[in-house]
Image (cartoon, rainbow, N blue to C red):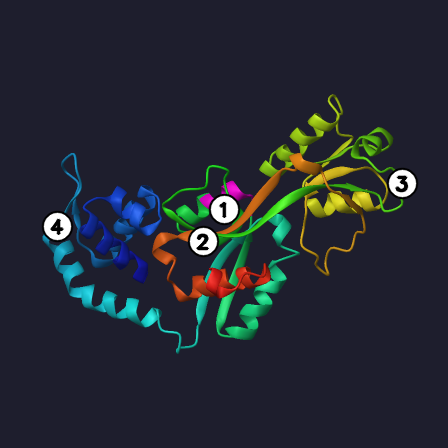
Amino acid sequence: MKFEFLMTLNSVLRHGSFASAADDMGLTPSAVSLQMKRLEEYVGQPLFDRSGRTVRPTPLASDLAESIRTALDAVEEARTRHSAALSGRVVIGAIRSLQPTMIPLVLREIGDRHPGLAVRVIQGDSGELLDHLKAGRLDGAALIRPTSGGSSRLNWQDLERQPFVFVAPPDSTETTAEALIARYDWIQFDTSLTSGRTAASHLHRLSPGTRPRFELESIEAVLAMVSAGLGVSIIPRLPVAPTVRAPVRQIPLGVSTPTRQIAFVCRNGDADNRRVRAIRDAFANGYGITRDDV
């Protein structure tokens, strides 16, 4: 049984429903329901009366919440202290383009500052990672923030707004994107991803009717192809990192340059969790954001 289940139970009783507790904890209602069922299995008795249209707590649930409230308050106070060394395990998600660029920086800082903290990194696209986070399978994630701003049930920390750039072979001599498109094949970044669709949309504005010769699933693969002289592309500008060694020419796209917002996100209930905060701070440091800005 996880301690977080007790925190969720306390939230359900304070807010009066699974849906409201889901908003408070940054979970989906189904995840709250599953946690409560697991807690009932652990204590061996029902904590909620599900016979009517609404789910009502049993006296046992109220008694249990009341008896652990002091402990919950004590844990909340303890986890906000900075004197104790961090330990345990945290699971985070990161989109693929951050794996060879920012993740080594983040894990190096965690290793230096918090040697007792174990970190597991899961790869996925932004939509998948958000689903995993809401379901409680991740503690936090670094991903592309939705253009709508993202769910208010989650805690967002913007890290960097990345412009897209036109990339061409290092020995190319053409000075405009249009001339380069006329000479080279088009290499398309995966259009099943938001960034790939953004790049494809901008290409069609530059050169209507141009079709990709190749479509690849990773920005690193696109860079390798372009560096080898096999075509041109539009990709998000990436941080310089030792693991990305494919030299290319980068050409700004001008006033209509599309961008994407990289952000770290966690559940509202975990925003003050010291392990999650350590990961968030490591990402912020990697992007040059001081703790006073976070």
Q: CA distance from mark 3 to mark 1?
A: 40 Å
Is residue 1 left or right of 277 when viewed as pictured? left
Q: Which residue is mark 1?
A: 129
N-term-proximal mark, 3 vs 2: 2
- Tell me, yes or no, whether the two marked residues, 1 and 2, touch with CB atoms within 8 Å: yes
Of circles 4 and 1, which is in front? Answer: 1
Q: CA distance from mark 3 to mark 4?
A: 75 Å
Is 273 placed above or below 113 here? above
> Which quarter shows the N terminus?
bottom left
Of circles 3 and 1, which is in front? Answer: 3
N-term-proximal mark, 1 vs 2: 1
Three-letter amino acid code of the residue under disc 4: Thr
Three-letter amino acid code of the residue under disc 2: Leu
* Residue 138 disc label: 2
Answer whether residue 191 is visible to the viewer in this image.
Answer: no
* Disc 3, SS: loop
* Disc 4, SS: loop
- Tell me, yes or no, whether the two marked residues, 4 and 1, touch with CB atoms within 8 Å: no
Q: Which residue is mark 3?
A: 173
* Residue 58 disc label: 4
Neighbours of disc 3 within 10 Å: few (<14), some (14-19), many (20+): few
Q: CA distance from mark 3 to mark 2?
A: 46 Å
Three-letter amino acid code of the residue under disc 3: Thr
Magenta region:
124-130
Is residue 56 left or right of 72 when viewed as pictured? left
- Tell me, yes or no, whether the two marked residues, 4 and 2, touch with CB atoms within 8 Å: no
